[in-house]
Image (spheres, rainbow, N blue to C red):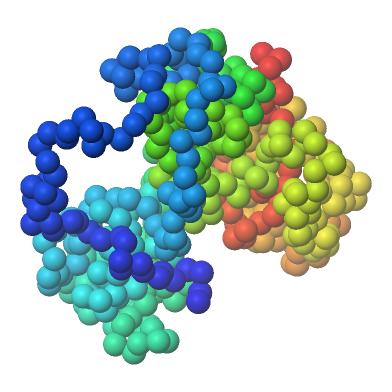
Amino acid sequence: MDEGEWCTVKSKHTNQAPKSNRRRVKKEQPRTKPKSDARPRRKSTHNNTESNTQNPYHLPDHDDSNDEDDEDDSADPIDDPVPPYHTTILTVCPLPDCPSDRPFLDTTSLTDHFRTDHKLIFKNLHHMYMALDPYLKRWGEELRSKPASDYGMPDSTSKDVFVIDPRKCDLDQKLRTEMQRHALDEVLAVQQKERDGPAKEPRKCLFCKVVCDNRTMLFKHMFSEHNFNIGLPDNLVNVNEFLDLLESKLIKLQCLYCEKTFTSAPVLRKHMRKKKHFKIASKNRQYDKFYVINYLEPGKNWEHFERDNCESDDEKSDPSDDSWAEWDEEEPESSMCLLCPRVEPSPQEAWEHMEKKHSFDLSRLRKQLGLDFYKTIVLINYIRHQSSLDKCFVCGTTVDDFALLEKHLDENKCVTKPLDPKADFWKDPKYLLPTYEGDPLLTGFDDDSDIEEETK
């Protein structure tokens, strides 16, 4: 099956439970439960009301050693089989002649509805999660004037179902590009406001009573003291909302990783410590909206980005543990030089080639211009874009062929000339999007912005 397609688990993911069933279940439960029937529970030293309203890691110290695991052999909730890209939503179908007037609560039921009731598939719809409602609303308007057959191609498995694919439908490609850039602009604006305000405010650690002076110190503390890593602050947006969401799960006595719910704070603490579950569930796409990578490269999961750029403490803590061997040995991606047609086996070798052959040192440029992670992305995409047009990224001269660009750079010593820090391309949001989809150079450079934060 094409990974961009959807499969649906009808037995589990539905729009809404029928009201009649909910009433019947409620009626069958006894109003009072005899004490003799009550399930024996372990005594707790904590007040129940307090436990239900506070982070269990902020409660008074308690010896967890004698608490039971209170675990069973059932599968972790996060391991329950779900379709690819499944996540919770709240939306109504905006397509014309829709037979459903109820809201959809998850993306699986929504896509199943499109295929069954509208004979329509939106290819890689998960790329548009950041702007799902306006995207579908716009298509609802388009499909009121023309049928889906005018925009889509017949599905290979069912000829009466049409697939709207951005690679084959110019309108869909245009809509996606416009909305992705708009969403990216909004996210970057929010991120900048956070850096100027909330990022500088103190906040208590999720897993102990330490209060950190700012967000950078908080993230470093949680990583070094608790081995909890949700990525670099520069890669996140709406961070307070993200941390509030994680803390709300802890307050409900829910493990952040396996998403099991426990009976008391000590049991949860012991479980997370014993199982090393100080991390978030990688399959939970509820977290995608907090990672800027999902706006830079729509459809790319945040976990892949963080895995590529952040070495976890587990990976470096025990060199004798070969259980991570398969994880560490990532297959190198061939990478083309920004300034000539040469292709190297990996991004690192491509950067080394550019430094030796063209005197292009990215690390030196970043320090000279004070480039953070996103400005570096802009620079790489700008150079790649100019080179694709056979243009010099410094002086703008156009050569007859890309292969001749190297000669121009050498003869005019363009690479050694300073870049204008006020040039228009720095502010153009299109250069936050990759010129070539999946360009390995975008995730193949050393991001030491966190080191720079320490020195401030």
At 34% from the left and 73% from the top, the residue drawn is 121
Residue 6 on image: x %, y %: 41, 69
Considering only vertical position in the picture, is 59 above or below 342? above
Residue occupying the point 74% across, 27% down = 367
Q: Is residue 166 visible in this depiction of the protein?
A: no
Where residue 277 sits in the image (x, y, percent)? 56, 36
Residue at left offset 14%, top offset 51%: 25
Quarter occupied by the C terminus:
top right
Question: Residue at 38% of width from left, 49% of height from top?
Answer: 130
Is 454 placed left or right of 252 in the picture? right
Res 154 quadrant in image: bottom left
Most distant residue in the right direction? 356
What is the total number of numbered labels drawn onto the structure image? 0
- Give above or below for 189 relative to 161: above
Q: Estimate the x, y position of residue 238 in percent, counting from the top left.
A: 42, 31
Front in this rendered view, residue 15 or 103 = 15
Please identify the residue farthest to the front as the structure is shown: 36
The answer to whether residue 132 of the structure is visible from this angle is yes
**Considering depth in this image, is 405 or 5 the residue closer to the camera?**
5
The one nearer the camera, 432 or 55, is: 55
Picture coordinates of residue 320 (x, y %)? 85, 41
Among the 4 quarters of the image, the one containing residue 227: top right
Q: Is residue 263 above or below residue 139?
A: above
